[in-house]
Image (cartoon, rainbow, N blue to C red):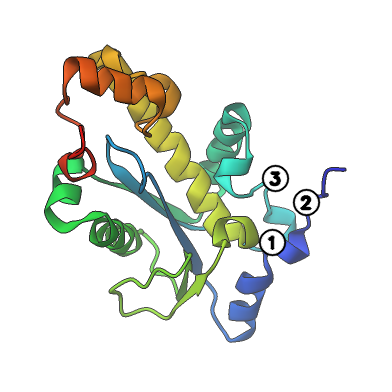
């Protein structure tokens, strides 16, 4: 039986921060830490949190169909008080490693918001080098409305990028795997070598 979307559960962390006097709360998340190719994409979003303004269905982007993600991403962008999407490319990932690249992307996403938040919610155990109060939430993309919203717009953005890269580099099945190391992707690497968007530090074995 499918669980009903529960606004009270989804906004528990946001409500706790509001009770402490925070008005604007940013959720931040990343997509694309694991792939062999393409950027890591980080998004930050400040959503209105009154119950009448909540978008039903916001959840961990991995739990949603592509069509549902795209529908929700548009609603999130339309309703957000502020949002930003930052790409950190494969060259930077190779230079500073994926963890530091993710932290950099999250920092840039927060700092480039048009509205300065009072507090930041991040997914997982990630700590960002920012001066704002921040709280990490394990499985935050599923448990926090703001982080879930960030995860959706980041995922839709990155998937669209990988669909375009699939046209440029047709040998790796990027449209299906989005850069992750599927059998078809690895077969393409073995047959055709690496393309410009491959992460060299992730593909040493090939």
Of residue 35 and residue 150, the one placed in the foreground of this image is 35
Secondary structure beneath label 1: helix
Query: Residue 153 vs residue 72: left or right?
Result: left
Read off the residue under disc 2. Answer: 5
Residue 61: x percent and y percent? 56, 44
Q: Residue at x 11, y 53 (%)?
A: 95
Label 2 close to label 1 by CB (< 8 Å)? yes
Q: Is residue 140 above or below residue 84?
A: below
Secondary structure beneath label 2: loop
Q: Is residue 23 visible?
A: yes
Q: Is residue 43 above or below residue 175?
A: below
Q: Earlier in the sequence, mark 2 or mark 3?
A: 2
Read off the residue under disc 1. Answer: 10
Q: Residue at x 39, y 24 (%)?
A: 183
Name the quarter where the C terminus is drawn. top left
Residue 157 disc label = none
Q: Is residue 47 visible?
A: no
Q: Earlier in the sequence, mark 2 or mark 1?
A: 2
- The CA distance from mark 2 to mark 1 is 8 Å
Q: Earlier in the sequence, mark 1 or mark 3?
A: 1
Secondary structure beneath label 3: loop
Label 2 close to label 3 by CB (< 8 Å)? yes
Q: Residue at x 43, y 44 (%)?
A: 154
Badge 3: how crowded within 10 Å, few (<14), some, or many (20+)? some
Read off the residue under disc 3. Answer: 57
- The CA distance from mark 1 to mark 3 is 10 Å
Q: Is residue 55 above or below residue 178?
A: below
Badge 2: how crowded within 10 Å, few (<14), some, or many (20+)? few
Looking at the image, which residue sits at the far front?
205
Residue 26: x percent and y percent? 47, 65
């Amino acid at each position: 039986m499918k669980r009903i979307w529960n606004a009270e559960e989804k906004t528990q962390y946001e409500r706790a921060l509001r009770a402490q006097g925070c008005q604007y709360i940013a959720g931040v998340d990343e997509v694309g830490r694991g792939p062999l190719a393409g950027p890591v994409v980080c998004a930050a979003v400040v959503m209105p949190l009154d119950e009448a303004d909540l978008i039903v269905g916001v959840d961990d982007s991995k739990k949603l169909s592509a069509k549902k993600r795209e529908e929700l991403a548009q609603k999130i962008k339309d309703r957000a008080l502020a949002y930003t999407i930052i790409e950190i490319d494969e060259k930077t990932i190779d230079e500073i490693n994926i963890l530091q690249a993710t932290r950099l992307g999250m920092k840039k996403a927060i700092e480039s918001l048009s509205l300065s938040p009072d507090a930041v919610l991040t997914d997982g155990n990630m700590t960002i080098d920012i001066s704002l109060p921040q709280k990490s939430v394990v499985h935050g993309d599923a448990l926090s409305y703001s982080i879930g919203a960030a995860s959706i717009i980041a995922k839709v953005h990155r998937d669209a990028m990988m669909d375009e890269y699939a046209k440029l580099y047709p040998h790796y099945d990027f449209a299906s795997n989005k850069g992750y190391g599927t059998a078809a992707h690895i077969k393409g690497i073995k047959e055709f070598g690496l393309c410009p968007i491959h992460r060299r530090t992730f593909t040493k074995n090939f």
